[in-house]
Amino acid sequence: MRAHRVIQGALLLAAAQLPFIIACAPVVEGSDGAETEAEPDRGDDTDPGPESSDTTSGGGADVPDPALDLFACGFELSCERVVVHISPIPPEALTCAAKLVIGGSTGVLSSLLTPGPYIDETESLILVLGDGTALVQTRERHCGREGMECGPTPVWEAPSPHQICDLVVSPDVEAACEEDAEGCGWRPWADLANCRAVEEHTCEDVAALLAAR
């Protein structure tokens, strides 16, 4: 009898709570206007599909091709190359360069900056065009710093884009060169100004320019 009363009480309690359970259940309205119980949220089951991939050649921004290497053209130097470590040597090369620039002739000059103590070099090729400007290209190589792997012969990095630069000669240098006096010197690595990008020249293009004057 006691167990029967307990079961009867539980049934009465469940019957009393049923209206509240139905009232709180979420509903959705079907296309026919009838309300149906919403299905439980199972999360976003949408198939995102394969991840998009970069179809650009090389994966990302295009890398520009390296500039045409004028160092490989093998142009004969008009003056000895100037090497600068502590001071430029040989000093006679500066005088030769100054007379070439002031004289309005075409020619080929070169300089190598090597401050050290590591292999830390910047080479410049100056193709004097005889009109107060020069076609200039530089290249660099670096090795020996902490964490840098060095082979037996460090290779040059890709050369810089071609530039046209104005040749700078001070009145004092001009006067010294006219008198063959001390102070007649032109620095291929420094006495340049207003450098600007220019379309690439082939070895044949440069040879024609140098032969034009």
Image (tube, grey):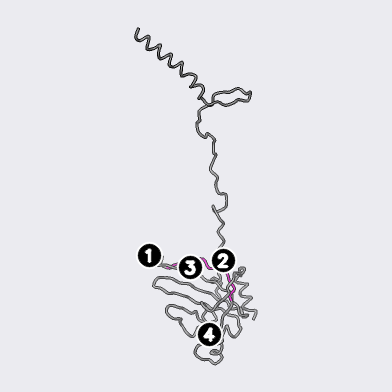
Whether pointer 2 and pointer 4 mark residues with C-beta atoms closer than 8 Å, the reply is no
Marks 3 and 2 sit apart, C-alpha to C-alpha, by: 13 Å
Q: Is residue 133 above or below residue 157?
A: below
Q: For marks 1 and 3, give the CA distance.
A: 19 Å
Q: Is residue 145 magenta?
A: no
Residue at the disc numbered 4:
96
- The amino acid type, in three-letter code, at marker 3 is Trp
Secondary element under disc 3, as helix, strand or loop, is loop
User: Label 1, on which residue?
Assistant: 146
User: Which amino acid, mark 4?
Assistant: Cys
Report the residue that reaches farthest toward the left: 2
Residue 122 position in % (x across, y down)? 48, 72
Q: Are marks 1 and 3 in contact (CB under 8 Å)?
A: no
Numbered tag placed on residue 156 in the rendering: 3
Q: Earlier in the sequence, mark 4 or mark 1?
A: 4
Task: Please tell me which of labels 3 and 4 falls first in the chain.
Answer: 4
In the image, the segment drawn in magenta is 153-165
Q: Tag 1: Cα neighbours inside 10 Å, few (<14), some, or many (≥20)?
A: few
Cα distance between the residues tagged 3 and 4:
27 Å
Q: Is disc 3 in contact with disc 2, using a CB cutoff of under 8 Å?
A: no
Return the x and y of residue 41 as percentages of the image width and height.
50, 30
Q: Outermost residue toward the top?
A: 1
